[in-house]
Image (spheres, rainbow, N blue to C red):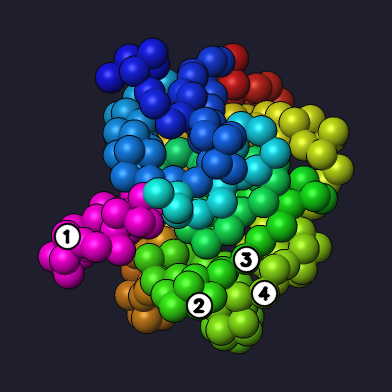
Amino acid sequence: MSKNEWETIIFSIEDRIARVMLNRPDVHNAFDDVMIKELSVVFDEIEKNQDIRVVILTGKGKSFCAGADLNWMKRVKDYSYDDNLKGSLKLADLFYNIYASSKPTIARVNGTAIGGGTGLVAVCDIAIAADRAKFSFSEVKLGLIPACISPYVMKKCGEGKCREFFLTGERLTAERAHAAGLINMVVPLDELDNVVDELVKRLVSSGPEAITKCKELLRNVAQMPFDEAREYTAEVIARLRISDEGQEGMNAFLEKRRPEWTK
């Protein structure tokens, strides 16, 4: 699918940085089945592209993502259980694929993130939000629950905060979302791009294989008992020390020069 065929997103790659912009500003970048499909395709492409080092996800206009599109919800309301399950699994797969991406992902939260939009924030490795951003797990107000996004929000915010946020559906300021761990930093809107760009520079200065293995480590170790983690972590670092990238990184450090991957 060429970039001219995207209906709901803008996708570009420049200087090893992939940028994915939700492009439905007239409905605050709410997602529907088309956007879910397009995001799934583009993140599959990103995963296969070895030249991409960092992914930035953001929204066009004033909002990041307002959750599910109302017109799509009108259709979904009349779906059978089987059709609803099929659609929900596609959304769950999208969240997992972004979360499990081998590339570091940054959520550039330019504005409001509601419902599933907060899920897109939570599945990214690092989230930088403009101070005007607002967040809400508003599903209970519709007689629904934040089901597919819950594993990722609970990992970031913990069960205690999720009990409060999921059950009340209250609107959260960027500061409260930061205090809860949903986002990593709050900055003025006019500084958002500069902060994201500086973060990108820090990420691309690291070894690409090390970044990939670090993301695997983060996913795996949290699920392991200590005796299993002991052997797993020792094996991982032993392999990296003798790898081409590990050798280059250690030699560059000892020789007081920049490693080849930064050039």
Residue that numbered label 1 is attached to:
83
Horizontal side of 101 relative to 126 (left or right) equals left
Cβ–Cβ under 8 Å for marks 1 and 3: no
Horizontal side of 83 relative to 23 (left or right) equals left
Q: Quadrant of residue 46?
A: top left
Circle 1: element type: helix
Cα separation, mark 2 vs mark 3, equals: 11 Å
Q: Which residues are magenta?
A: 72-99
Cα separation, mark 4 vs mark 2, equals: 10 Å
Residue that numbered label 4 is attached to:
170
Q: If you read the primary sequence from the N terminus, does the residue marked by circle 4 or circle 3 appear first?
A: 3
Q: If you read the primary sequence from the N terminus, does the residue marked by circle 4 or circle 2 appear first?
A: 2
Q: Residue at x 32, y 28 (%)?
A: 45
Which amino acid lies under the numbered mark 3 shown in the image of this protein? Ser
Cβ–Cβ under 8 Å for marks 4 and 3: yes
Depth order, front residue of 184/238 = 184
Q: Residue at x 24, y 55 (%)?
A: 87
Which amino acid lies under the numbered mark 4 shown in the image of this protein? Glu
Cα separation, mark 2 vs mark 1, equals: 22 Å
Residue that numbered label 3 is attached to:
136
Tell me if residue 168 can be seen.
yes
Depth order, front residue of 42/137 = 137
Depth order, front residue of 208/59 = 59
Residue that numbered label 2 is attached to:
140
Residue 3 position, x and y percent, is 39, 16
Q: Residue at x 82, y 50 (%)?
A: 131
Camera-near label (1 vs 3) is 1
Count of numbered circles in the view: 4
Does residue 81 belong to the magenta stretch? yes
Residue 47 position, x and y percent, is 34, 34
